[in-house]
Amino acid sequence: MLNQQTPLDLMFQALADPSRRTMVERLSRGPASVSELAKPLTMSLPAVVQHLQVLEASGLVRSEKVGRVRTCHIDWAALQTAEDWIMDRRKNWELRLDRLGDFLAEQKKG
Amino acid sequence: MLNQQTPLDLMFQALADPSRRTMVERLSRGPASVSELAKPLTMSLPAVVQHLQVLEASGLVRSEKVGRVRTCHIDWAALQTAEDWIMDRRKNWELRLDRLGDFLAEQKKG
DNA sequence: TTGTTGGTTAAGCATGTACTTAAGTATATT
DNA sequence: AATATACTTAAGTACATGCTTAACCAACAA
């Protein structure tokens, strides 16, 4: 699908990159500055900032600048949205299995 | 990061596209043929097959061909992997909150 | 055997993504 | 005031992605 991205698109897209997952992983242990996020990554600072922009656009991460340092943190509610989508699929499946079970039980009985 | 994709990269990437999520959603209600998957989508069959290839490459979906129809289904263990990554981040966070709580309690006590 | 269904392969194209380097701008520090 | 720090902006490039159409092939079905 060309353009017009939903929140879920942006979130899964954001999580699809290993550098960005490293950043999220770091942030899951507490807030961090841009350069702290950059430390474990083998790329230029501007590249890190671009990844950060992707994470912010997805809603997964937010940040505020105080003085000259920008501090970033995870938005847990947003991460929940991605988790929920997956869990909802599983629920679908389990519902189906339940109905199948009921049907089979009914067959056996009747 | 250029090339060399991990399983997690491929899964989140696969889930980042709304057409592919529609396909997964359909499959979460039970197996389906390629043309069944194509039905709700407004694109050519080859495009659908390409999406299917992305889903298969990620491990989220598998398929077998019998006669001339290919039947597709979700690999639930694979989907679990994506779910786990998110949940692990949350655990990290909760662990941190626990430690913070302990620290504050210790401070208060003495 | 002729046609139809269900899918597959190949090639091409427009757009998006993940970097890079170079240069710039505030906010500390000395 | 001069220097360093912590980003920020801009522009360019290589490669990846999401489609398309056209042509093909292997089951069935009539």
Image: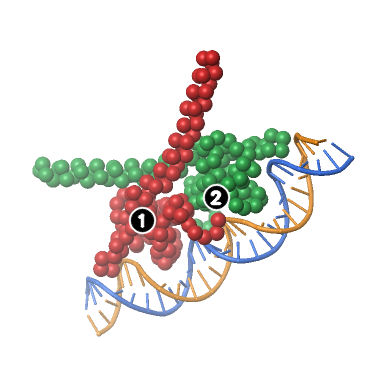
Chain colours: A green, B red, C orange, D blue
Q: Chain of mark 2?
A: A
Q: Quadrant of the N terminus of chain B?
A: bottom right
Q: Position of residue B86 (x, y in %)?
A: 45, 42
Identify the residue at the far top of this view. Answer: B110
Residue drawn where x is 44% and y is 44% of the image: B85
Q: Which residue is mark 1?
A: B61
Q: Chain of mark 1?
A: B
Residue drawn where x is 48% and y is 46% of the image: A8
Mark 1 lies on a secondary structure that is strand
Residue drawn where x is 18% and y is 45% of the image: A103
In the image, B23: left or right of A57? Answer: left
What amino acid is at disc 1?
Answer: Val
* Alpha carbons under labels 2 and 1: distance apart: 25 Å
Q: Quadrant of the C terminus of chain B?
A: top right
Q: Position of residue B31 (x, y in %)?
A: 29, 55
Residue A27 picture quarter:
top right
Comparing C16 with A20, the one in front is: A20
Looking at the picture, does residue B101 appear above or below residue C3? above
Q: Position of residue B4 (x, y in %)?
A: 49, 59
Looking at the picture, does residue D2 appear above or below residue D28? above
Residue B6 visible, this orientation: yes
What amino acid is at disc 2?
Answer: Ser
Q: Which residue is mark 2?
A: A19
In the image, D23: left or right of A47? Answer: left
Mark 2 lies on a secondary structure that is helix
In the image, C29: left or right of A74? Answer: right
Pointer 1 local density, CA inside 10 Å: few below 14, some 14–19, many at least 20: many
Pointer 2 local density, CA inside 10 Å: few below 14, some 14–19, many at least 20: many
Looking at the picture, does residue D6 appear above or below residue B48? above
Residue drawn where x is 44% and y is 40% of the image: B88
